[in-house]
Image (cartoon, helix red, strand yellow):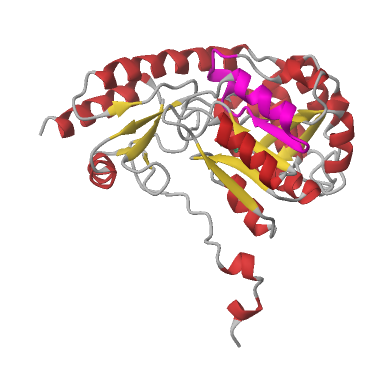
Amino acid sequence: MNIKELVKPNIRSLRAYHAEDLPCRAKLDANESPYPALSSQQSAVSVKNALQSLNRYPDPQAISLRKLLATGLKVKPQNILHGNGSDELIQSLIATFGGPVLYPVPTFSMYGIIAQSLGERRGAVPLDEKFDLDIDKFLDAIKKRNPKLIFLSSPNNPTGNSFSYDRILKIIKRSNGIVVVDEAYQPFSSKKSFIPMLKKHKNLVILRTMSKTGLAALRVGFMITHEDIVNEVNKVRLPFNLNSLSQKLAAAALSDEKPILANVKGIISERKRLMREMKKIKGIIPYPSDANFILFKVEDSDIIHRMLLKKGVLVRNMRGVVDGCLRVTAGTPGENSEFLRMLKQLMTK
Ligand SMILES: *Cc1c(COP(=O)(O)O)cnc(C)c1O
């Protein structure tokens, strides 16, 4: 029996998501925070508390967590929906509204992968030479394809820059469908969030995550949007999508955000240092970043990737996404110095 023949055609042509798990001293490949958002002591209290009701299902509505998130963002809990990571919300949004799904490229790969896995049509519009939205081409694509969903990661992964505010706004205004502004990296950005625009634009969804600021292991993502959209997407959300441990630990982190904010501040200053130092290295071009990582061009990304790994530094090879490019996440000052030292060594050979 050939199992492959039983699989839906849209799944047959997909490949399973591959995250490299290579042994290294400095893990700078996945845009994680080098600092956990909770001390092990704080975590222990929340875990102990959660362990007392392991026989019970988690709160399906994640009420405490959504209240805390709402207070922090100055919105109402009914404007927030929680996901098992924002990845899950991308899936729920596409399951709810369907395609065509439109996004610029290069961008976060999951928009396309999830659209395909759900059998929806998708369209990709190349960014301009500054990695900003090519507004004429994008508006053209909107007119031609009338997408139900548009995904804009701003700051954009993997390029690092934010898209022009005015161009995003134009897309929100011209779209007859939903526009999702994925603000996974907003905490690291000096540019404005689109959250204040929610009042004016009913078709706007903001995605956020706790993964890049020190809680990636918990898988806590959320969207902020009009109550009508929350209610529709809530129909496809599985009832117990966010486990009790994640809910309690995330709530603990949110009840005092000072350590997270301090970590974010440190990471921003390290990103700036990385940028300054990388600009001095001959043979590489680092691109401006509002995120916790920097995309940079080298002559042969395969070689540099392999050589860095040999020296214990793991970065992400963007071959096939942005050719000749690597992406490095800002780590601890020690890890970043190590990365810079190794890169300088390789480039002056
Ligand atoms: C990392 C990332 C996500 C996924 O975050 P999770 O909450 O961990 O699923 C979503 N969007 C972008 C642009 C990302 O880089």
Can residue 47 be seen from the camera position used here? Answer: no
Q: Residue at x 36, y 47 (%)?
A: 319
Residue toward you, 148 or 7: 148
Within the image, what quadrant is residue 73 found in? top right
Above or below — where is 263 with respect to 215? above
Above or below — where is 4 with respect to 279? below
Can residue 315 be seen from the camera position used here? Answer: yes
Q: Residue at x 53, y 23 (%)?
A: 162
Looking at the rendering, the stretch of residues picked out in magenta corresponds to: 165-191
Residue toward you, 57 or 228: 228
Ligand 1, seen in the image, is in the quarter at top right
Query: Percent x, y for residue 70?
Result: 80, 20
- Relative to 338, 42 lies left or right: right
Q: Residue at x 61, y 45 (%)?
A: 111
Above or below — where is 65 with respect to 233? above
Within the magenta stretch, is there residue 29?
no
Residue toward you, 258 or 168: 168
- Relative to 61, 290 lies left or right: left
